[in-house]
Image (cartoon, helix red, strand yellow):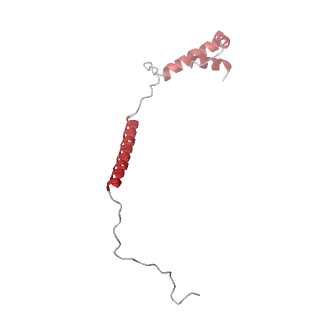
């Protein structure tokens, strides 16, 4: 691509360009013909009724609401379980019952004695 094509493409694409180079490109009959060709090509490629759309503002998706609701429910259930467990341990006595049988442990000796 030559400089004329680059300047005219920058003009049509709303990109920065040098005004002097644009003036030089449009003073040449080939540059004017190229500008007309590029405008017609753009008209063919882009529909007439298309309107440029501004980017949408970022909104919160329903999926993120569900994730937040699940996280809140999980947190509440864990907190309720912890509090219920604390209350239950306060009311239950921790006295162990008396043993019914006592087992004494003896060291293990393999059959046939030690070598």
Q: Residue at x 35, y 63 (%)?
A: 95
Residue 69: x, y in percent?
36, 39
Residue 57's image quarter?
top left
Judge whether 8 appears above or below 108 on screen. above
Name which quarter of the figure residue 58 lies in: top left
Left or right of residue 27: residue 39:
left
Residue drawn at the location 39% of the way across and 77% of the way down: 102
Please determine whether, in this image, residue 49 is positioned above or below residue 81: above
Q: Closer to the camera, 83 or 75?
A: 83
Residue at horizontal 67%, vertical 19%? 3
* Pick the front one: 50 or 81: 81
Q: Position of residue 5 (x, y in %)?
A: 63, 19
In the rendered structure, the answer to whether residue 53 lies left or right of residue 11 reads left
Q: Residue at x 57, y 18 (%)?
A: 14
Where 72 falls versus 99 (above or below)?
Answer: above
Query: Relative to 23, does residue 109 appear above or below in the rendering?
Result: below
Left or right: residue 112 compared with residue 96: right
Q: Position of residue 10 (x, y in %)?
A: 60, 19
- Specify whether 39 is left or right of 95: right
């Amino acid at each position: 691509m030559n400089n004329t094509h680059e300047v005219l493409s920058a003009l049509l694409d709303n990109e920065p360009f040098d005004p002097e180079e644009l003036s030089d490109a449009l003073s040449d009959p080939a540059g004017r013909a190229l500008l007309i060709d590029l405008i017609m090509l753009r008209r063919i490629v882009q529909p007439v009724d298309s309107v440029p759309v501004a980017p949408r503002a970022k909104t919160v998706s329903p999926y993120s609401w569900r994730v937040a609701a699940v996280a809140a429910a999980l947190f509440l259930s864990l907190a309720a379980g912890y509090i219920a467990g604390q209350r239950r341990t306060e009311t239950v006595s921790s006295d162990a019952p008396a043993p019914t049988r006592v087992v004494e442990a003896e060291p293990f000796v393999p059959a046939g004695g030690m070598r």
